[in-house]
Amino acid sequence: MTSISLTAPRALALAAAALLCGPLAAPARADVAPGQQRTIVAVGVASANVTPQDRKRNDSIKAAVDAAQAQALPDAIREGREYAEKLATAAGVTLGDLLTISNAPASPYGPFGYQFGPFGVDQYCGDRRVAIVRRDANGRRRVVGRRTRHVCIVPPRVVQQVTVTYAIAS
C-alpha cells in the first residue's frame, strides 16, 4: 500500500490545476430521441391590485377580482416568453413556436385560485360570529356573548402564474 503525503502549498497547487482543467472537459450534449422535440420551459408570474368600486358589495369585489386576473394574465405570459428568450440566448439556441401553456400552480399546497373567496366560491362577503369580550371585577377578560357581523374581505392583489413551453428552433 502506498501513501502520499501532500504539503499545504502542493495541495493548493493541485486544487488550482483541477479548477483550471475543469473547463477543458467536453461540453454536455442533450441527445434527443427520434420523434421528440427539444424544448425550453419557463415560468411567468404577474400580479395586479384588486380595487373594487364598493368594498361592501360582493358583486363589486368579484368584478374587481376578475378584472385583476384579466390584467395579470397577459403580463404573466409576456414574462414567461421573455424568460424563455433569455434561457434560449444563454443556451445559444433560437426560440421556436409556443407548444404549451398552463396556468396550473406550481404550489405543493394545492390549486387554490381566487374564485375561492373566504365565504365560498366567488363569495367575498358573509356573516361572521365574533365574541363580545369584557373585563370582570378582577380585570380578567371574559366572553360575555356573541354577535354576528356582516364583513367583506377584499384580496389585496391577484397573482397569475403560467408555465410556457417553446420549441427550440435551432
Image (spheres, helix red, strand yellow):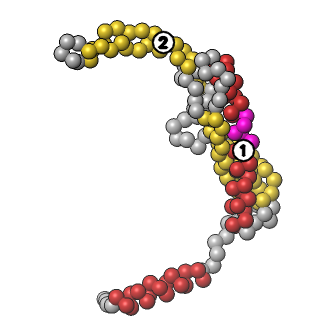
Residue located beneath label 2 in the image? 149
One can see residue 11 in this view: yes
| Highlighted magenta segment, given as a residue range | 70-75
Image location (x, y in percent) of residue 74: 74, 42
In the displayed structure, does residue 142 sit left or right of residue 46? Answer: left
Identify the residue at image location x=58%, y=21%: 124
Q: Quadrant of residue 112?
A: top right
Mark carried by residue 75: 1
Give me the disc on residue 146: none
Vertical side of 97 occupied by 162: above or below: above
Q: Hey, which quadrant is residue 8 in on the image? A: bottom left
Q: Nearer the viewer, residue 10 or 3?
A: 10
Instruction: Name which residue lies at 38% across and 9% down.
Output: 146
Residue 121 visible in this rendered orientation of the protein: no
Q: Position of residue 41 (x, y in %)?
A: 68, 53
Q: Is residue 71 magenta?
A: yes
Residue sitting at 58 percent across and 43 percent down?
106
Position of 147 with respect to 36 (left or right) is left
* Relative height, residue 79 to residue 140 (above, below): below
Q: Nearer the viewer, residue 96 or 123?
A: 123
Of 62 and 29, nearer the camera is 62
- Say which label, 1 or 2, has the lower sequence index: 1
